[in-house]
Image (tube, rainbow, N blue to C red):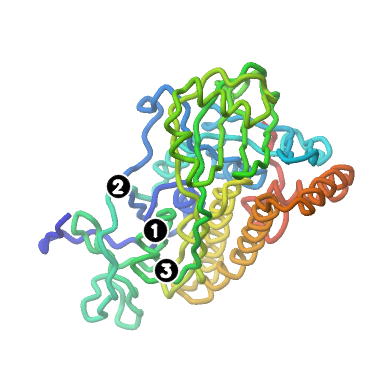
C-alpha cells in the first residue's frame, strides 16, 4: 500500500501495540483506565460471534490456571464462558511404542480442573470487548508499513524541549505517522516489528508439521486431555464442549504431529479414511472417530528472540518466542508476558518514570526470559526423548514414566508448573479471590 505524503497527523499515543491477538489485547486490557493513551493496530480485528462459522475454530489453546486468573481479573472470562469453554480435570499421557503411562488428576493438586480448552477466537473476542470499552484505548484496522529512526528535529509529539523525543517513527498502512513513547510487537510469529528492527533470533525447523481439526468420537471424552507419543511425534485429543455446562461431549480438538514427508498423504485422505487412520493412531481410546471438520496444517518451528527489548520497543507472545505445541503452553507464555509488562509499566507510572526508561523494559525481560527459556528447554527435551528410536532408551523412558506415575509429590510439582502457578507471577495471575468455573 502506498503512503500519502499528505497524511493527516493524529494524536500521538503513549503506547502503540502492533497486533490485536491474545497477547496484545491482554496488555491493552491490563492497562485500561491508566493515565496512558493506547493505540492497538491490526489489519484484522476480531470478528463478532454472529460472523463466526458454525464449526469450531480449529485453533484452540489449553489455558492454564494462571491464564484463567488473568482473564478473570480483566473481566473477559464471563463472556468466554457464555460462549463455550471446556475444563479438563485429568490428563492421560502414554508412549505409543511401549507401556509407559502418566496420569494427572486435578484432585491430586487440590483443584477442580487443570485447565480449559478454549477456541482462540472466543478468548480474543472477549478481550477485544474489554479493550473497546476502555476510554484510554483505541483500536484501528490498520497494518504496520515501516519503522524509522526518529529525527529529533522533526519530532511532532508536542513535548517540551527538555523532553527526549520518542526514538521511533512508525508509519501505518494508511500513511499515518506516529511517534509513540513505547512500541510493542505483539504481531505473532511472523512479527514485522521484530523483523524490521532486526531483533536477532535463534530459529530452527523440526522437519514436522501439525494437523489441526475438530473431531467427533464414539465415546465421550470425560473432560480428559489425552496425548500419545508416536514415532512421528505427539498426537493430542483435547476435550471440547458445545456449551460450557455440557457434561458428556464427544467433541475433541486434535493436534497431530507428523514428519513433513508424511503430511501430504494424510492431508489428501478422504474424510472417512482420515478418521480411520486417526482412530488407529490414537489406539481407539475413545472408540471410532466418526466425523472430522476440515483439516489445517502448519509447519513446526522453534523461534526465540535473543533479546525481547530494544530502546523503546518490547516483544511479547509469539513475536518473542514460539514453542513446540506438544504441551499447549504457547499462549500461556504470551499472556504472562503481557501481564508482566503491564505490571512494569504500572510500576513506572507510579514512580513517574518515562515509559521508555531502560529500567522498565530490562525488568520485564529479566522476569520473563528465564521462565520462557526454561519451559522451551523442557519441551525440547521431551520432544527429543520421545522422538528417539533407540530400543534401550525406549525401555528406559517407559520404565521412567511408570515409576514417575507412582510419585504423587513429584507429579504435583509438575502439575503446579503446568498450571502456570509457580515462579515470578504477576499479580494478575496469582491465586486469590477467583472463583472456579
Q: Secondary structure at mark 3?
A: strand
Left or right: residue 246 versus residue 166 is right
Upstream in sequence: badge 2 or badge 1:
2
Q: CA distance from mark 1 to mark 3?
A: 13 Å
Rendered location of residue 66, percent (x, y): 65, 47
**Residue at the far bottom in the pictured view:** 162
Rendered location of residue 180, percent (x, y): 34, 66
Asked if 146 appears above or below 224 in the picture, the reply is below
Q: Residue 313 has which mark?
A: 3
Q: Are marks 2 and 3 in contact (CB under 8 Å)?
A: no
Q: Secondary structure at mark 1?
A: loop
Residue depicted at x 22% and y 81%: 153
Upstream in sequence: badge 2 or badge 3:
2
Q: CA distance from mark 2 to mark 1?
A: 13 Å
Q: Are marks 2 and 1 in contact (CB under 8 Å)?
A: no
Sort mark 3 into few (<14), some (14-19) or many (20+) by Cα contacts within 10 Å: many
Left or right: residue 366 versus residue 416 is left
Q: Residue 43 has which mark?
A: 2
Residue depicted at x 64% and y 44%: 231
Amino acid at each position: 500500500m502506498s503512503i500519502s505524503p499528505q497524511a493527516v497527523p493524529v494524536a500521538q499515543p503513549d503506547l502503540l501495540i502492533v497486533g490485536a491477538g491474545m497477547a496484545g489485547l491482554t496488555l491493552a486490557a491490563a492497562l485500561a483506565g491508566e493515565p496512558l493513551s493506547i493505540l492497538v493496530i491490526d489489519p484484522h480485528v476480531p470478528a463478532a460471534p454472529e460472523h463466526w462459522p458454525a464449526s469450531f475454530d480449529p485453533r484452540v489453546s489449553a489455558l492454564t490456571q494462571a491464564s484463567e486468573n488473568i482473564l478473570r481479573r480483566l473481566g473477559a472470562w464471563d463472556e468466554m464462558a457464555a460462549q463455550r469453554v471446556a475444563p479438563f480435570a485429568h490428563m492421560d499421557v502414554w508412549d505409543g511404542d511401549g507401556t509407559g503411562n502418566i496420569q494427572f488428576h486435578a484432585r491430586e493438586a487440590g483443584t477442580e480442573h487443570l485447565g480449559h480448552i478454549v477456541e482462540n477466537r472466543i478468548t480474543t473476542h472477549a478481550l477485544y470487548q474489554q479493550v473497546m470499552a476502555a476510554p484510554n484505548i483505541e483500536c484501528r484496522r490498520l497494518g504496520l508499513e515501516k519503522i524509522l529512526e526518529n529525527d529529533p528535529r522533526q519530532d511532532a509529539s508536542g513535548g517540551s524541549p527538555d523532553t527526549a523525543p520518542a526514538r521511533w517513527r512508525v508509519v501505518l498502512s494508511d500513511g499515518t505517522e506516529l511517534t509513540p513513547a513505547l512500541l510493542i510487537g505483539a504481531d505473532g510469529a511472523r512479527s514485522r516489528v521484530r523483523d524490521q528492527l532486526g531483533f536477532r533470533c535463534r530459529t530452527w525447523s523440526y522437519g514436522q508439521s501439525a494437523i489441526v481439526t475438530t473431531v467427533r468420537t464414539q465415546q465421550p471424552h470425560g473432560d480428559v486431555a489425552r496425548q500419545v507419543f508416536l514415532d512421528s511425534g505427539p498426537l493430542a485429543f483435547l476435550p471440547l464442549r458445545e456449551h460450557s455446562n455440557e457434561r458428556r461431549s464427544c467433541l475433541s480438538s486434535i493436534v497431530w504431529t507428523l514428519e513433513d514427508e508424511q503430511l501430504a498423504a494424510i492431508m489428501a485422505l478422504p474424510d472417512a479414511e482420515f478418521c480411520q487412520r486417526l482412530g488407529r493412531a490414537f489406539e481407539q481410546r475413545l472408540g471410532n472417530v466418526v466425523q472430522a471438520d476440515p483439516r489445517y496444517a502448519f509447519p513446526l518451528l522453534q523461534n526465540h528472540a535473543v533479546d525481547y527489548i530494544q530502546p523503546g520497543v518490547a516483544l511479547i507472545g509469539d513475536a518473542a518466542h514460539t514453542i513446540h505445541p506438544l504441551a499447549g503452553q504457547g499462549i500461556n507464555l504470551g499472556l504472562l508476558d503481557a501481564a508482566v509488562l503491564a505490571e512494569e509499566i504500572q510500576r513506572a507510572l507510579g514512580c513517574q518514570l518515562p515509559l521508555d526508561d531502560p529500567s522498565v523494559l530490562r525488568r520485564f525481560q529479566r522476569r520473563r526470559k528465564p521462565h520462557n527459556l526454561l519451559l522451551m528447554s523442557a519441551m525440547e527435551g521431551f520432544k527429543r526423548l520421545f522422538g528417539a528410536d533407540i530400543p534401550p532408551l525406549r525401555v528406559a523412558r517407559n520404565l521412567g514414566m511408570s515409576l514417575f506415575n507412582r510419585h504423587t509429590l513429584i507429579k504435583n510439582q509438575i502439575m503446579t508448573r503446568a498450571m502456570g502457578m509457580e515462579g515470578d507471577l504477576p499479580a494478575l495471575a496469582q491465586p486469590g479471590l477467583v472463583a472456579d468455573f
